[in-house]
Image (spheres, rainbow, N blue to C red):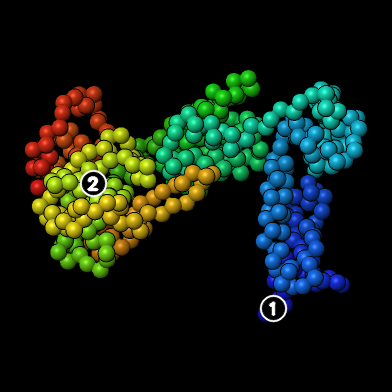
Amino acid sequence: MVYRKLPSYIYKRRQGFGLQRAVPSDLRDVLGKAKFKEPGGATLNEARARVPGFVARTDELIRTARGQSRLSTDELMEALPELTADWGLEPHDVVVALQMLGLKGVDALSPKQVRRGADLVLGQAQPKRLYTAEDLLDARRRDKQPAARTYEGWKKALVSFMDFTKKASPLSCTEQDAVDYKDRLLDQVSRNTAKVQLAYLSGLWTTLLEKNKKENPTHIFKGLASSLEENIREKALRASQRKQNKLFQSAPIETWSGSMYVPVFKILYYTGCRLAEVAALRGEDIHDDYISVEWHEERSLKTANSVRDIPIHPKLAEILQRFRGTTGYLWPRLKTVKQVDGVEVIRWGHNLSKPCKLITGLKPKDFRDRFVTVLRSLDFNQINIERLTGHSALTTNSTYGGMDWPKYVQMIHSIQ
């Protein structure tokens, strides 16, 4: 094995040290070089200190170049004033400029495109601003004000699609791009996952049409998600795996031990709550005889119907006693945060699935299924079950009427 004597990016020069980094092969025509090089200083320590800045600068150059390499001919035209400012080109050198930027087939430019390029280079026309994927995400976010995790889903879907098309602007994407991407998704992920991704993209393109009416874009994802509806065979095969055909038998609850989060598992067992609803409980949510599930900034809810009060089961009273009178989150370590475009994406309890399964024999979602199964087996009213579990109403009639608290208490006490 060969060991390097010097850190990566650093090389020895005749006097002192230098920094170098290979340019990705697909960008060498765009950048006009095969390596990035900078002085590294007189000493090795000085060169090491300069490496982070060198890497950051070259990363930015690579990102910019990749964006340029995706521009269509007309989009690249609009970038000419910025990209050719230091080249000293004449207006009639538009074709030369585009060739220098690595674009192939520019000899087929129309007279209109050449005139547009000349006007831009001369400053006689203002370049059009490129509408990017970031612009679309920002517009969609302002319109819909989504939960952070929903925004994260939009971004992942859009970035994946734009990477697939190799285009710089969503306005340049075509219906064929969308169909080809659907086929690629079906080769890589499940049908349901593909359907969700296409639904995200369909919503984004609805916003694209609203914000860019002058460009007259096409809704390239319209109907694609619904086209993935399963056939009878697929539905039958999936039905055989559904939880409605399974039993939810946990280990005896008195044997649960080995984790500081056993109280979380027991609350899931006796309330039918979602995992995030329990993991993000605060002392303020524990009342004399009920638990409140409410919206707060660091723990969004799945739907507006998730807001509810749940009676406390007698076997939870002792567990919850030590939390009464406290303030703040009961299990702050169950919170994880990451940044997506400056937006905090917060998740609660997502790392509990494995220990929950190990200790109780069920996953957190299984407790919710078990809870509903028990209540149905005891012939409780379906509307009350929906309200107690925070599900949306299935019919208009089910939204009528108020809370039947004594019945909710009876339902909770029936869980064994």
On the question of residue 105 being in view, the answer is no
Q: Is residue 253 left or right of residue 142?
A: left
For the residues labelled 1 and 2, the Cα–Cα distance comes to 59 Å
Q: Please give the residue where the numbered disc 2 appears in the rendered image.
A: 285
Instruction: Tell me the residue at 80%/34% (across/down).
Output: 81
Q: Nearer the viewer, residue 400 or 363?
A: 400
Instruction: Tell me the residue at 77%/63% (across/down).
Output: 20
The vertical placement of 297 against 116, above or below, is below
Q: Is residue 397 left or right of residue 31?
A: left
Q: Nearer the viewer, residue 365 or 325?
A: 325
Image quarter in which the N terminus is found: bottom right
Q: Residues within 10 Å of mark 2 (few under 14, many from 20)?
A: many
Q: Is residue 92 left or right of residue 199?
A: right
Q: Nearer the viewer, residue 289 or 361?
A: 289
Q: Earlier in the sequence, mark 1 or mark 2?
A: 1
On the question of residue 44 being in view, the answer is yes
Residue 280 % position (x, y): 31, 50
* The residue positioned farthest toward the bottom in the image shown: 1
Foreground mark, 1 or 2, reads 2
Q: Residues within 10 Å of mark 1 (few under 14, many from 20)?
A: few
Considering the numbered disc 2 on the image, is that residue within a helix, a strand or a loop? helix
Residue 228 % position (x, y): 44, 36
What residue type is disc 2 on? Answer: Asp
Q: Is residue 54 left or right of residue 260?
A: right
Residue 190 % position (x, y): 44, 46
Q: Please give the residue where the numbered disc 1 appears in the rendered image.
A: 3
The answer to whether the residues at label 1 and label 2 have Cβ atoms under 8 Å apart is no
Residue 127 % position (x, y): 75, 28
Instruction: Tell me the residue at 52%/27% (across/down).
Output: 207
What residue type is disc 1 on? Answer: Tyr
